[in-house]
């Protein structure tokens, strides 16, 4: 049961990049349940339209590639024109696949960095002059690979480490105008494409959960609640923080 009151986000505008599936769609739906005007974006136009329809009446769905700054900026301007000043911006578009460095092409490495790191920059920088100041809350979706090296994940480790540092620098630079910038680092989350790739079998899933302190995967709804907290007044004095919602995954092997 959520601790957040109904209509907590009433009157606020939220944009979720990568919000057409998985964790990010879960965040978008939760924001809408709490009264926010919600817009999502993803690369696939059909998925964007379906995601908006699943969120509910009034939600907007856009197609754009966050690697393209101009396209991202155009979407942000359209949202601001239709909904008004942006109160909440979530950068959650991400790429991942399993590959050792010797099996990783330069293009594959660059693609993940472009989506995760450059995409986060494009979303936040593109939103800057459309944000409510003071009062806007920016959230980037990071990952445990940002701080814990993981074999066959060099591209993700590099990209997410950059995301964490970008969060901290933006928090410092934009704090004086009243804009907070934070991150969420999810652990293994059930029902996501990422875990389907990293743990495609029951045996692989059991091996992962057996090392987590809480002995289970997290739920998309638990990440959504973390996002609500970070953009709520309860977190008004929190900025430059990466919130680990990971069941203790980053503590190390808990067997």
Image (spheres, rainbow, N blue to C red):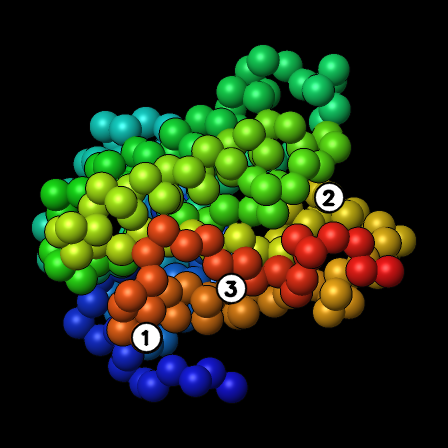
Q: Secondary structure at mark 2?
A: helix
Distance from label 1 to label 2 (Cα)? Answer: 34 Å
Q: Residue at (75%, 61%) from the top-left corner?
A: 212
Q: Residue at (74%, 32%) from the top-left corner?
A: 151
Q: Secondary structure at mark 3?
A: helix
* Residue 14 can be seen in this image: yes
Write down the quadrant of residue 114 in the picture.
top left
Nearer-N-terminus badge (3/2): 2
Q: Residue at (59%, 42%) from the top-left corner?
A: 147
Q: Which residue is mark 1?
A: 234
Nearer-N-terminus badge (1/3): 3
> In the image, is 103 to the left or to the right of 111?
right
x, y (%) of residue 11? Answer: 17, 72
x, y (%) of residue 131? Answer: 16, 51
> In the image, is 151 to the left or to the right of 118?
right
Name the residue nearer the viewer: 169 or 192. Answer: 169
Name the residue nearer the viewer: 137 or 50. Answer: 137
- Vertical placement of 154 versus 83: above or below? above
Mark 1 touches mark 3? (CB < 8 Å): no
x, y (%) of residue 190? Answer: 66, 61
Q: Which residue is mark 3?
A: 223
Write down the quadrant of residue 255 in the picture.
bottom right
* Residue 132 can be seen in this image: no
Distance from label 1 to label 3 (Cα)? Answer: 16 Å
């Amino acid at each position: 049961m959520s601790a957040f009151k109904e209509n907590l986000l009433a009157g606020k505008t939220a944009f979720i990049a990568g919000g057409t599936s998985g964790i990010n769609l879960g965040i978008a739906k939760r924001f809408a349940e709490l009264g926010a005007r919600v817009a999502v974006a993803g690369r696939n136009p059909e998925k964007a339209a379906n995601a908006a329809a699943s969120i509910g009446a009034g939600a907007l769905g856009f197609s754009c590639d966050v690697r393209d700054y101009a396209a991202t900026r155009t979407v942000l301007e359209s949202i601001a024109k239709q909904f008004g000043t942006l109160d909440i911006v979530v950068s959650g578009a991400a790429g991942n696949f399993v590959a050792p460095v010797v099996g990783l092409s330069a293009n594959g490495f660059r693609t993940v960095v472009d989506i995760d790191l450059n995409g986060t920059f494009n979303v936040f920088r593109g939103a800057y002059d459309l944000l409510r100041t003071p009062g806007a809350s920016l959230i980037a979706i990071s990952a445990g690979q940002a701080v814990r090296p993981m074999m066959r994940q060099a591209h993700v480790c590099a990209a997410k480490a950059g995301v964490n540092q970008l969060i901290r620098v933006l928090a410092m630079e934009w704090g004086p105008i009243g804009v907070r910038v934070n991150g969420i680092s999810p652990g293994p989350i059930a029902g996501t494409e990422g875990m389907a790739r990293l743990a495609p079998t029951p045996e692989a899933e059991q091996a992962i959960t057996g090392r987590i302190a809480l002995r289970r995967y997290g739920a998309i709804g638990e990440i959504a609640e973390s996002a609500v907290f970070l953009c709520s007044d309860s977190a008004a004095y929190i900025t430059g923080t990466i919130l680990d919602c990971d069941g203790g995954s980053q503590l190390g092997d808990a067997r």
